[in-house]
Amino acid sequence: MRFSFFDREAIVRELTEITFDLVIIGGGITGAGIALDAATRGMKVALVEKNDFSSGTSSKSTKLIHGGLRYLKQFHFKMVAEVGRERRIVHNLAPHLVIPEKMLLPIMKGGSMGMFSISAGLKIYDLLAGVKGDDQRIMLNKKKAILTEPLLPEDRISGAGFYAEYRTDDARLNIEVLKTAHANSTLAVNYMETTDFLYADSKVKGIICKDRISDRSVNIRGHYVVNAAGPWVDDIRKLNHSLTGKHLHITKGIHMVISREKLPVRQSMYFEVPDGRMIFIIPREDISYIGTTDTDYKGDKDKLYATREDAEYLLKAVNSTLPSIELTLNDIISSWAGIRPLISEEGKSASEISRKDEIFISGSGLISIAGGKLTGYRLMASKVVNIVSGKTKKEFGKSFRKRKSRHFPLCGSNFSNYDEVINYINKIAVKLSLMGMPDNRASYLVHNYGYQTEKILDQVLPGKGTDMEETLLMKELAFCINEEMVVCPLDFLERRTGRLLFDIHSVEKYYEKVTGYFRDIFDWPDNRYEKELAIIESKINCSKNLQT
Ligand code: FAD
């Protein structure tokens, strides 16, 4: 079966016919990682997601695969070591999608961190994570720091640390992990909401879902059920009548996008602001994005947006570190907001709460996992699947293969190193140019799709267009409909391509064409077409305009 809406009916039918070794609730990176880990061990796995895959926190992060330097300050050495080592592994699994990114950490006069503490901190960071060779941190004196980043204020800078991290696209990483799980027999379906549980002898033996496409109720049976619903973990525990003891503490973080022209940083930066928090600026193609905030959140988890207050905090932070830039609210092109599913710790503020993950097992056997980070998705997955594997052995005497996800390159990722990625980008640029298409899209395509780029270029469209940028976009859309379970235009514009976040102008230019393609392919009636247009318009509005 293809991982496509065209085969959704068949996938849903099969979901109701089999008893799975493992059923997973939640199609963010945590659920996707668990599915892949379990599938590669030989488990029969089902996964359901109530909206689109990665529509929760896993498309709203800072999009870094990082060890969490700031957690050193909180003495979380074990977590920094584990997650830090993961960076290289995740890079090797998808070198085109998890790309090396040098980070500049300026040391400001009057700041809480001096040259010595930064030097020692970064050294420990490298040692814990086993960073070697050119990737090891170097310290820059004042002159070198300013040469590296001329936007830094000469009178206030005393030097900088320069160290290695990785940058990704969280939603694309999420979908490639799921596609790889699908290629290993996982049945995953989006727009399928868990509304209750199936029980036998008071033990959870499956889930009841509402299929949001057909409006039907669907029962999925499984020996074990994992709740990987991120910020909704406690809602699912409540459905299971097991919300006792520890619970989630939800905090919100926003990012805002500024044109590269206005904020022309030469590389990523990580800097301290007057309240002691740390902020990132990450350049990406024609834009730079800034993040993030960390504030307690008690509102509607399905309706998130950046407020003027959030944005003013970040503007102030950047303007105090790079005063020549003078950013204002008018410079914000777009923004996004996400929520962190942290585990509550008595008396600690949002920024102080640990990002470590925890597993809760209810009396009826529901296994819930919360906390953690995008970077550590494989480690979290392995802990959960070890539990499921142990329980299966005990209850059914059935054994599975050992964990293998470390050696499973993600879809489109058969590159042996980053040099190969660069060579492939050059090859694609030539190909695009021969096809009369914009060759400057080569880097975007390869970083998002890896070796699948040629599949995109091979897509056949119904008509011949004259706008080659549009033709390329439509080929990308056809690929995502055929191979990435895209159900509606926003799945494509926001999550598969990241355009709503990073290239909102192209969304404004092409969303009617994109929606028209859906109408033609899926034979949508006019009212569905109009409804989808209204959804995108409201999203554009929310992304461009801050709420009060
Ligand atoms: P989610 O991605 O939210 O997935 C849970 C899914 O469950 C959702 O898609 C939801 O729709 C689904 N669901 C809920 N209820 C149901 C139901 N009833 N039925 C079916 N499905 C359901 N980590 C990093 O490593 N690097 C970073 O740079 C980074 N930056 C961050 C910045 C911000 C602002 C935030 C908020 C987080 C950041 N993180 C970062 C953390 C990281 O993004 C999260 O840890 C991770 O994305 C959580 O993934 P998840 O799968 O647990 O949750």
Image: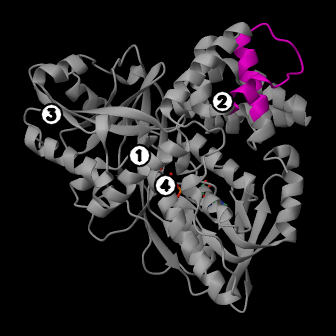
Secondary structure of the magenta portion, mostly? helix
Residue 318, quarter of the rendered image: top left
Disc number placed over residue 253 in the picture, else none: 1
Q: Secondary structure at mark 4?
A: loop
Local secondary structure at mark 2: helix
Residue marked by disc 4: 299
Name the residue furthest bottom: 201
**Crowdedness near tag 2: few (<14), some (14–19) or many (≥20) residues, C-alpha within 10 Å:** some
Rendered residue at 83%/47% (across/down)? 2
**Dot 1: element:** strand
Residue mark closest to the camera, 1 vs 2: 1
Q: Which of label 1 and label 4 is nearer to you?
A: 1
* Residue 164, picture quadrant: top left
> Which residue is the site of mark 3?
107
Q: CA distance from mark 4 to mark 2?
A: 23 Å
Q: Position of residue 459 (x, y in %)?
A: 81, 26
Q: Amino acid at mark 4?
A: Gly
